Amino acid sequence: MSTTSHEQRPDLASESGSGSGSESGSVSGSGSGQPAAPGCGRNRRLRGLLRKEWLQILRDPSSIAIAFVLPVALLLLFGYGVSLDSKHVPVGIVIELPGPEAASFAGAFRQSQYFAPVFYATRQEARAALRAHELDGIVVIPADFAQRLKGDRDAPVQVIVNGVNANSARLLSAYVQGVWSTWMQRELSDRLIPVVQPVNPETRIWFNPEVRSRNYLVPGLLVVNMTLVGALLTALVFAREWERGTLEALMVTPVTLREILLGKLLPYFVLGMGGMVLSVLMALFLFQVPMRGSLWVLAACSTLFLLAALGMGLLISIVTRNQFVAGMIAILATFLPAFLLSGFLFDIDSMPVAVQAITHLVAARYFVAILQTLFLAGDVWSVILPNAAALVLMAAFFLGLSRRRLHKRIE
Amino acid sequence: MHRILALVIKEFLALFKDPRSRFVVIVPPLIQLLVFGYAASYDLNNVQYAVYDRDGGYAARELLARFEGSPTFSRAQRIERQSEIAELIDAREVLLVVQVGPRFTADIAAGRTASVQIIIDGRNSNTAQVALDYTNRIITDFNRDWTAARGLQGPPVHLVTRAWYNPNLESRWFFVTGLVGILTLVVTMMVTAMSVAREREQGTFDQLLVTPMRPTQILVGKAVPGLLIGLFEASLVVLVAVFWFEIPLVGSLAVLYTGIVLFLFAAVGVGLMISSLAVTLQQALLGAFLFMVPAVILSGFATPIANMPEPVQWLTLGDPLRYYLIILRGVFLEGAGFPLLVHEMWPLAVIALATLAAAGWLFRHRMG
């Protein structure tokens, strides 16, 4: 910004009076201060701006931390820490009257990796343990279990789960049901009791047959990461310059608004792409997520998405002109929406229509669809093209609006 | 005392003199609670699916009618060719395809076990599992009714599952109580994390340090606004959760507010510690973020802590949000009292004391 090139533009001079040579004060660039040919002046101004932005990034390491440390830390935490695949769920088995049938059924729970069974003799003890959060569920094997098995009357066996976490509770009851039907079938065929099971479902889970939740969490997390990185990198840049008054100083120099925007966008774009490359490498090599699509599609879509994310950050920064407000909005508008409204964890089709409409405003939504498909399914153009088009629109919208809202005026 | 009061008033003025600051503290968290309260749910209620019925017999129609009638599934798309299965699933037009084999009705009429193929898009493995659970339940019900109607011998005993505290297993109950915690954390952290850093950046913190105020007084002056705003915010979101989302509040308000206040102290402590470590607002924002994002991820908000590997589970012990969410869900859904929740409350107190002490120490010892 301190490359004070001496060619004066008439429109600027009239607008802001005499302001040539005003130093920004925050960073001193390499002002060569010579008269220059108009064509290369533009280039040199942009170079000067870029250089200043880089120096600022390098001197306050927090930007580099945002671009590289944040994605790595988050990916490590999520990749290793977050899983929806439960193992060793503590479940209480109440055996009211020991017997061969009860022992055989309880043994079925011992063999499953999913359960860590704890045995009780009375319901009261097990209920107390469930209340104290020591157990997630209880299976009650009643005293007349053996008789009931022989009888032809349909008699229930009680299962109680802690329903506070509805999703875990549902999975738990599905697993108990699974253990139960396997055991039941073996038991009945051992005793030559003929039982009719009219329909037997055969399930195929495509793209992720072993149902590894990491395979879908990691691509989704890349998106959350990049949303955060993109918006955080740029959310404060203009607000900071407004607050410090250095943007006013910049206004009186011959740099054009487009150059100012480019000067702010390019360095952070490079940083953001660096973070993206790092995250993709970690996803592929550390977390072993399969990559079934092509890399150039990934690169192209990441570029689009990052432009949209950076554009949103710039817009927030330009509109608010206040670091506190910009920071607050950046957090509220990026992290939680990307986390909750992108379809990364929660199924968008199941949301109410009004909320579904809101998800269309979240750039992360399109990128999640693209990444989950690219990583797990391949280059499916019917998914990629519409979502990429939406990203183009969003990038153009945010960057265009940023350009419109950035005036060379002081109120 | 009046010195502290003066500082508190000044802090409130600094925060609320700007109408937009006022706005971002109050309105967006409420909007978020409303939007996310509806969005955050693992329940499926509008599953797009397709049917490839190669049988066409009465038994197949009866089974498929049960899918059609289930509130989970929306209207089925019918397909005629095998290749359409891949097209529809690849393009994400349907989540699953039910394929009925050509001998389905013949098998079932002859008393043999007929099979149905369920093909599910596993790109989101959790959604796939939940959908699978729904289809299995439909088929189990079908089997029971089919055998009962025809007087056949079904399994003599069957399981009956009851869910305590949340009988219909609505995951909204779980997530809205979680959101109450997250939004309290976000607002409190932002208010406090920015407070000292802003003064550092503007250079007024050094001035504050040379006034006769002691670091403890500055600490109290900086902490009180965060606490009050957090308390206000928490009460607001609790009200919305109870009256808008109709989440049952079974436990007592005394237990709830003890938890809220303890959590707020911890959040304010962490916020002030980050704030006094930072030299610029950007660093404070980054610090708040670096704390908040893992805090949310590790809190058990969306994925259970028990599923994490052991070392990560130890990390969660330092996360105040973890304890707060257990308290919130305990009080709201289970009606838990002090005896059960005291194990969640004392770690919050420890975190609060440690971080507040560290922040006070940093005020003096970290001078730009």
Image (cartoon, coloured by chain):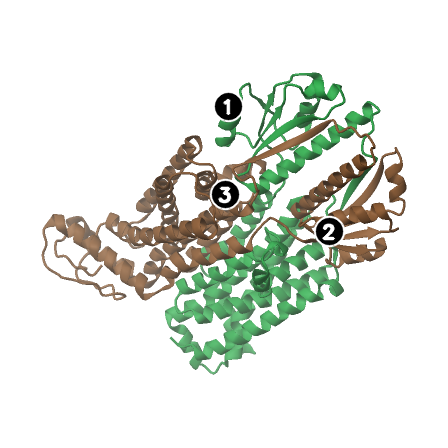
Chain colours: A brown, B green
Residue B290 or residue B233, whichever sits in front: B290
| Residue A379 in picture, x, y percent from top left | 41, 35
- Marks 2/1 in contact by CB < 8 Å: the verdict is no
Q: Mark 3 sits on what residue?
A: A342
In the picture provided, is A98 more to the left or to the right than B285? right
Number of the label disc, if any, that sits on residue B83: 1
Residue B299 or residue A371, whichever sits in front: A371
Indicate the secondary structure of the residue bearing disc 1: helix
Residue A219 or residue B217, whichever sits in front: A219
What subunit carries mark 1? Answer: B
What subunit carries mark 3? Answer: A
Indicate the secondary structure of the residue bearing disc 2: helix
In the picture provided, is A35 more to the left or to the right than B294? left
Q: Mark 2 sits on what residue?
A: A110
- Marks 1/3 in contact by CB < 8 Å: the verdict is no
The quarter of the picture where the N terminus of chain A appears is bottom left
Q: Can marks 2 and 1 be said to lie on one chain?
A: no
Inspect the image, locate mark 1, and give the three-letter code of the amino acid beneath it. Ser
In the picture provided, is B151 more to the left or to the right than A284? right
Image height of B342 relative to B37, above or below: below
Give the number of the mark in front: 2 or 1.
2
Residue count near mark 1 (Cα–Cα under 10 Å), binned few <14, some 14–19, many ≥20 = few
Q: Can marks 2 and 3 be said to lie on one chain?
A: yes
